[in-house]
Amino acid sequence: MRYRQARQTVSGDAGAVRWPRLLFNVAGNQAVWFVAVIAASQGHAWPGVLAAAVFVGFHVATATAPRVELKLVGAALACGVVVDGIAASQGWLRYAAPLPGGEGWPPAWILALWASLAVTLNVAMRSLQQRRWLGLLVGGIGGPLAYLAASEGWGAARFADPAWVGIAWLAVAWAMALPGLLWAARQWSAVAPDRQCNADASADTR
């Protein structure tokens, strides 16, 4: 009974800060996307990297489990290297502001967007952790649409002909990557709340 009460207390405290943090998380991630894409279209990668570093750094510094967030950033960066690295090396997608001499590698600003995405997994995308089938749809549809927006709206990327090949790759890759990251976020974050609840429950029994 005391354990349930402790769990409800923790949940209630989390709910009190949920909306401000959620709004900041969504707005911050979108701001990083616009800065990175617009700057890349002008041939500059560093503004997107800087914006992502500030956003991710603030999130990690204020997170209740910073080590988990850093692990998610690392996992997301690995996904970016694979997903965008394959697209670049196969010539399906050509990115603006590429790495010097690294036409077959994902540019720094794309990896910055993956890092920014990572810190939304436990906040803006938290509701998808128990609905990974929805995460599959969001990744498989939303992923390619984001690239198309960057391509058609700002010219930050360009699909090689036929464009459907690159779009199909992104759809499949993102449909696997996002649910995988959501799974990792839920698994890695599962221990911290239980430890807090156990600590609160122990305190109540004293």
Image: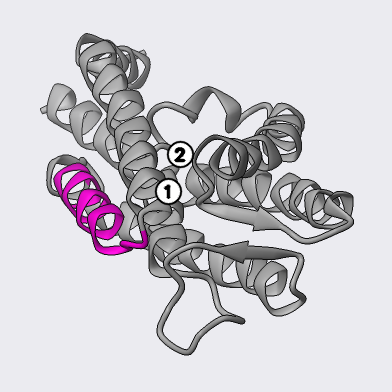
Q: Classify the position of the N terminus by image quarter.
A: top left
Q: Nearer the viewer, residue 122 or 190?
A: 122
Which residue matches tag 1?
118
**Side of 24 relative to 1 (left or right):** left
Q: Residue at x 23, y 55 (%)?
A: 47
Position of 39 relative to 83 (above/below): above
- Percent across and percent down for residue 165 are 87, 56
Q: Quadrant of residue 16?
A: top left
Provide the secondary structure element on which disc 1 rests. helix
Marks 1 and 2 in Cβ contact (< 8 Å) = yes
**In the image, what residue type sits under mark 2?**
Leu
- Magenta includes 99? no
Magenta-highlighted residues: 43-59
Q: Is residue 156 left or right of residue 30?
A: right
Which residue sits at x=21%, y=56%?
Answer: 53
Task: Tell me the residue that label 2 is attached to.
Answer: 121
Q: Say if residue 184 shows up in the picture.
A: yes
Q: Dot 2, crowdedness within 10 Å: few (<14), some or many (≥20)?
A: many
Indicate the position of residue 186 as horizontal and vertical percent values.
51, 42
* Residue name at image x 63 percent, y 28 percent: 130
What kind of secondary structure does the magenta stretch mostly adopt?
helix
Amino acid at the residue labelled 1? Ala
